[in-house]
Amino acid sequence: MRVGRLTWGVKQSFRQYVEMSGGTVTVGGGAARDEDGGFVLAALPGFDLALDDAGRPTGCGRFAGEVGFEAHGGMLRVSLVELGVETGANGLVLTCADGAGKDRRVEIARLDSDAITVEPDGAVSIPAKITLDGMMILGDHYPPGTVLDPVRLAGS
């Protein structure tokens, strides 16, 4: 099944912290929030990310949209642009564009392909842990290896 949608909440406690401190969580470029507060992004054309019969992702996908967090008068500012899921030398990873040009990608989380849960609708939920680059992007709040919200991949 070709992956058509990515849902990810980053980290529930991080979203709550930003909102409870008077900050804002914003979405744009096609991203939306779901009923649980997570973020839903549609697949961009031209990529081959798919789920095999066991629910394991294969290939590479990019997803349209931007998620932003801002708090403390702008001292906390995080922007996640064009999330992606890739399989490669480092295993299964969640990436995002680094900078406005979107030409450089950084790995923000490692995804545990051995702990995938296949949901009744065929979507998969994959546990995620933050990387060093992810720690830097989220403002140095969580050390590498911290558990993040799972990544959910679904068909169109």
Image: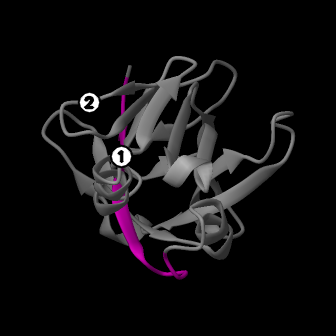
On the image, the x and y values in percent for residue 8 come to 38, 45
How many marks overall? 2
Residue type for callout 2: Asp
* 143 in the magenta segment: yes
On the image, the x and y values in percent for residue 31 come to 47, 24
Residue type for callout 1: Gly
Distance between the alpha carbons at the discs numbered 2 and 1: 21 Å
Can residue 23 be spotted in the picture? yes
Q: What element carries label 1?
A: loop
Q: Which mark is residue 22?
A: 1
Rendered view: 72 above or below 29: below
Q: In which quarter of the image is residue 87?
A: bottom right
**Who comes first in sequence, dot 2 or dot 1?**
1
Looking at the image, what colour scheme do you see?
one colour
Residue found at the very far front of the displayed protein: 73
Q: Which residue does the image show at 48% across and 81% down from the upper left?
A: 145
Residue under numbered circle 2: 34
The local crowd at label 1, few if under 14, some if 14 to 19, many if 20 or more residues have their Cα within 10 Å, is few
In this view, the residue in front, 152 or 8, is 8
Q: In which quarter of the image is residue 135?
A: bottom right
Rendered view: 119 above or below 113: above
Q: Which residue does the image show at 37% across and 59% down from the upper left?
A: 14
On the image, the x and y values in percent for residue 3 come to 45, 31
* 35 in the magenta segment: no
Q: What stretch is highlighted in magenta?
A: 142-155
